[in-house]
Amino acid sequence: MITIVKRCAWVGNDSQMREYHDKEWGTPIHDDRLLFEFLILEGAQAGLSWNTILQKRENFRVAFDNFDYTKISKYTDEKIEELMNNEGIIRNKLKIGAFIANAKALLKVQKEFGSFDKYIWKFVNYKPIDNKYKELSELPSKTEQSEQMSKDLKKRGFKFVGPTICYAFMQAVGMVNDHTVDCYRYKEINNSISKK
């Protein structure tokens, strides 16, 4: 007998998307470097598909020093030029400039709050929001929390952090559990949260 694993409808048949969905999307993250990686990747996605970003993720990691925000904050014009010539990433000068600005802004946030994790998770009161959506069509593109997050990030000098990008980020790093209730990951994530 074949067991059919039920996943969120957006996954489709792409193996990379499936692996991302099964192992990462919606899993609560509290590591500053990884949170920064997702903030950058979600910003890079603006106007593109997530699949495109996933395919270029390894190239991004290599090009951007494994998302080491301390190193990125010191990028020079020469480094920007090098990135603009890198065919393996999204070559958009505005986005690259934004990533450097975000690295600088993140370092300031760490100084103020002790960690980016402490700062960013306050927008959901340090606990993932369980949305219990039944259908993909119910998922919002932004929420009150993502609006607040966007406003505060922008005030602190972050760029490419509109409310929609912020909500996609919240979904990716597990600040909300937006797996539909029929998806096997929905229960897995809720169970792992309740054990903590």
Image (spheres, rainbow, N blue to C red):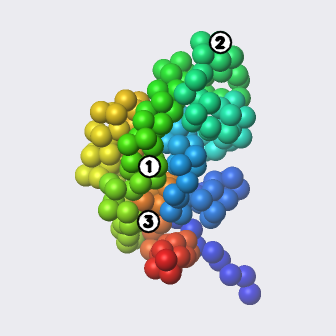
Foreground of the two, 74 or 145: 74
Tell me where residue 11 sits by quadrant: bottom right
Q: Is residue 17 left or right of residue 38?
A: right
Q: Is residue 123 left or right of residue 98?
A: left
For image coordinates 53% across by 63% down, the residue present is 27
Decide which of tag 2 and tag 3 comes sooner along the chain: 2
Q: Which numbered disc covers residue 196?
A: none
Residue 83 % position (x, y): 65, 21
- Disc 2 secondary structure class: helix
Q: Which numbered disc covers residue 177?
A: 3
Asked whether the viewer can see residue 167, the reply is: no
Dot 2: within a 10 Å radius of its alpha carbon, few (fewer than 14), some, or many (20 or more) residues? few
Q: Residue furthest bottom?
A: 1
Amino acid, disc 3: Asn
Amino acid, disc 2: Glu
What residue is pinned by disc 1? 114
Residue 51 % position (x, y): 61, 44
Image quadrant holding the N terminus, namely bottom right
Amino acid, disc 1: Gly
Gap in angstroms between the C-alphas marked 3 and 1: 26 Å
What residue is pinned by disc 2? 78
